[in-house]
Amino acid sequence: MSELIGLGLYTPAEAGRLLHVPPSKISRWLRGHHIGAQPYEPLWTPQVNLDDGRIYLGFRDLMEARIANEFISLGVSPQRVRAAIELASEIMGENRPLSTARFRTDGRDIFFQVVEIDESGNQRERLLNLFRRQYEFRQIIEPLLKTVEFDDQGIPSLWWPQGRRANIVVDPARSFGQPIDAASSVPTTILAVAGRRDGIAAAARAYDVSAASVRHAIRFEATMEQQAAE
């Protein structure tokens, strides 16, 4: 498992819980699927392959799925999202371009119609206007990226799923990318269970964290549970 350190590790169920996306949908995106006789290729190749036939996500996959889901929820087909990923990968040299800071600034180069004519005179669509509607790219992506920190290469390194004030972070270098209290690195699941069972003050003493950290963890886990039940 040492090769997974710094990558993060999520099953589709764990990723779906964090992203509020059905796990079956995430599996289809990363495994590919058929509708009738029509095959649909994966949107991209996951970071993690444990050779057990199951789908796993790394932290970069988690961030890529977060942006892809926003596009799809706006009515963009998964096939068109795949076309965007392919074209952006070609331009940027990134396998998971949607989640990068560079895509945020360079993305305007992608959102116009590109039609090429091959040697036989046939037209080939590289990428139509991605949204087919007059959405502003920044209005869609900027709110999602405000809670993400990027490294010097523009690669996502940390995610604050409820904003920095909640002090809960998803960091692939800690606890395999599970949500944790940022100050202590204790997973939110542990703090929430202890807080509910023993009380906030007792849980804070037991794990040497602030009472606020326990309260934040309880609220975070309650939100995850509520959204999973909807």
Image: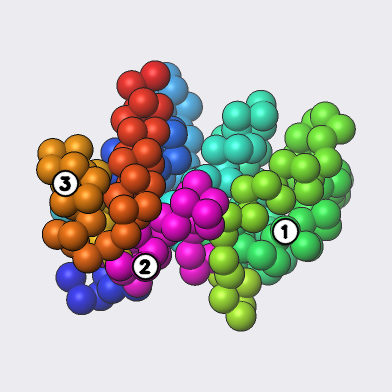
Q: Position of residue 191 (x, y in %)?
A: 23, 50
Q: Which residue matches tag 2?
A: 183
In this view, the residue in front, 32 or 81, is: 81
On the image, the x and y values in percent for residue 4 come to 27, 70
Question: Could you say which quadrant of the image residue 9 lies in?
Answer: bottom left
Judged from the image, the secondary structure of the residue bearing numbered disc 2 is loop
Q: Nearer the viewer, mark 1 or mark 2?
A: 2
The kind of secondary structure element at disc 3 is helix
The scheme the figure's colours follow is rainbow
Question: Which corner quadrant holds the C terminus?
Answer: top left
The disc at residue 194 is: 3
Classed neighbour count for the residue bearing mark 1: other residues with Cα under 10 Å, few (<14), some (14–19), many (≥20)? some
Whichever of callouts 3 and 2 sits on the residue coming sooner in the sequence is 2
What number is the disc on residue 44?
A: none
Q: Is residue 74 above or below residue 149?
A: above
Amino acid type at mark 1 = Arg
**Residue nearest the observer in this picture, 113 or 74:** 74
The residue that appears at 37% across and 39% down in the rendered structure is: 219
Q: Position of residue 204 (x, y in %)?
A: 23, 56
Amino acid type, label 2 = Ala
Q: Marks 1/3: CA distance?
A: 40 Å
In the rendered structure, which amino acid carries the disc numbered 3? Ala
- Can residue 151 be found in the magenta stretch? no
Query: Residue 58 is drawn in which quadrant?
Result: bottom left
Q: Which mark is on residue 104?
A: 1
| Front position in the image: 44 or 68 | 68
Q: Residues within 10 Å of mark 2 (few under 14, many from 20)?
A: few
Mark 1 or mark 2: name the one nearer the start of the chain: 1
Residue extending furthest front? 201
Q: Earlier in the sequence, mark 1 or mark 3?
A: 1
